[in-house]
Image (spheres, rainbow, N blue to C red):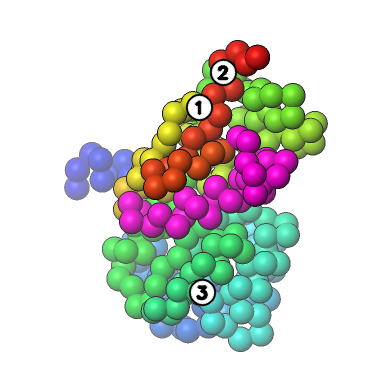
């Protein structure tokens, strides 16, 4: 094993992942592969049991099946997001594009389509966990954009009209990279590589969805954004707040 591979293993060793699925074989398959990568694995067979486990344990990630009895994955995710921002990977049926979009809109961080291999799942798990890791902080903890908007990079929250607005890990990373390049257009491909990882280079809808999430949180009128501007066919540009304005 190379030094890089050893470092990658140790980076995630001991992290706790909850696997939620009503199929015993699927849970066993996921558990075996996660434990080979030194993750600690908890399991639940339905959404009700899973929500209880979230409240009783400190989790780093949830792998959540869509189709389950008692409480399906979508409803569980909706309830989860009322009190927790723990990252979630949804397991969806092959070809169910609507399920993927619905999961992302409800607050999932990623999805994996069944059937999937161990390598694909581990790649997605590690990519999501990397996105939740702390970024190098800018020179100032609180960055003032204008009289209405500031961003506290230590607390990972926006301050809109004096009120704190919590940012989920992916929203935080996206805003960080946009503001770091304020005044410059950042392409879809650059944002995907920086925020999600190289393996997401074809998932352009991720950028669009999360830009919409950010606009809903920081813009006065999300349909007429003043901070995050669309450069059609290229990417997005955060206003150049660092230059003096008239």
Q: Which mark identifies residue 182?
A: 1
Q: Which residue is mark 3?
A: 99
Residue drawn at (54%, 82%) of the image: 67
Mark 1–mark 3 distance (CA, rounded to whole Å): 34 Å
Q: Residues within 10 Å of mark 3 (few under 14, many from 20)?
A: some
Q: Is residue 237 above or below residue 40?
A: above
Q: Residues within 10 Å of mark 2 (few under 14, many from 20)?
A: few
Left or right position of 124 against 182: left
Tell me how far mark 3 sits from mark 2, CA to CA. 40 Å
Instruction: Give percent across and percent down for residue 102.
Output: 56, 69
Placement of 125 over or under 143, stated as above or below: below
- Residue 181 is situated, as x and y percent measured from the top left of the image, at 46, 28
Q: Is residue 151 above or below residue 218?
A: above
Dot 1 falls on a residue whose secondary structure is loop
Q: Which residues are magenta?
A: 200-227
Where is mark 2, residue-wise?
242
Report x, y in % for residue 164. Answer: 75, 37
The answer to whether any part of residue 82 appears in the image is yes
Check contact, mark 2 vs mark 1: CB within 8 A. Answer: yes
**Label 1 packing within 10 angstroms: few (<14), some (14-19), many (20+):** some
Mark toward the viewer: 1 or 3: 1
Q: Closer to the camera, 61 or 152?
A: 152
């Amino acid at each position: 094993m190379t030094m890089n591979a050893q470092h990658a293993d140790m980076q995630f060793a001991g992290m706790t992942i909850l696997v939620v699925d009503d199929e015993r074989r699927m849970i066993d398959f996921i558990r075996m592969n996660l434990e080979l990568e030194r993750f600690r694995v908890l399991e639940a067979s339905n959404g009700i049991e899973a929500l209880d486990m979230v409240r009783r344990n400190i989790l780093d990630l949830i792998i959540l099946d869509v189709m389950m009895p008692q409480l399906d994955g979508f409803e569980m995710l909706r309830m989860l997001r009322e009190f927790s921002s723990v990252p979630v990977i949804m397991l969806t049926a092959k070809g169910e594009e609507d399920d993927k979009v619905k999961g992302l809109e409800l607050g999932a961080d990623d999805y994996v389509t069944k059937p999937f291999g161990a390598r694909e799942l581990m790649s997605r798990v590690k990519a999501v966990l990397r996105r939740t890791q702390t970024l190098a902080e800018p020179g100032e903890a609180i960055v003032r954009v204008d009289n209405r908007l500031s961003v506290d990079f230590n607390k990972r929250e926006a301050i809109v009209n004096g009120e704190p607005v919590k940012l989920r890990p992916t929203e935080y990373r996206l805003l960080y990279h946009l503001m770091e390049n304020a005044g410059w257009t950042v392409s879809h491909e650059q944002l995907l590589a920086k925020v999600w990882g190289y393996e997401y280079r074809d998932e352009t809808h991720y950028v669009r969805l999360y830009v919409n999430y950010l606009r809903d949180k920081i813009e006065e009128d999300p349909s007429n954004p003043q901070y995050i501007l669309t450069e059609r066919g290229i990417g997005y540009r955060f206003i150049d707040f660092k230059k003096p304005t008239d």
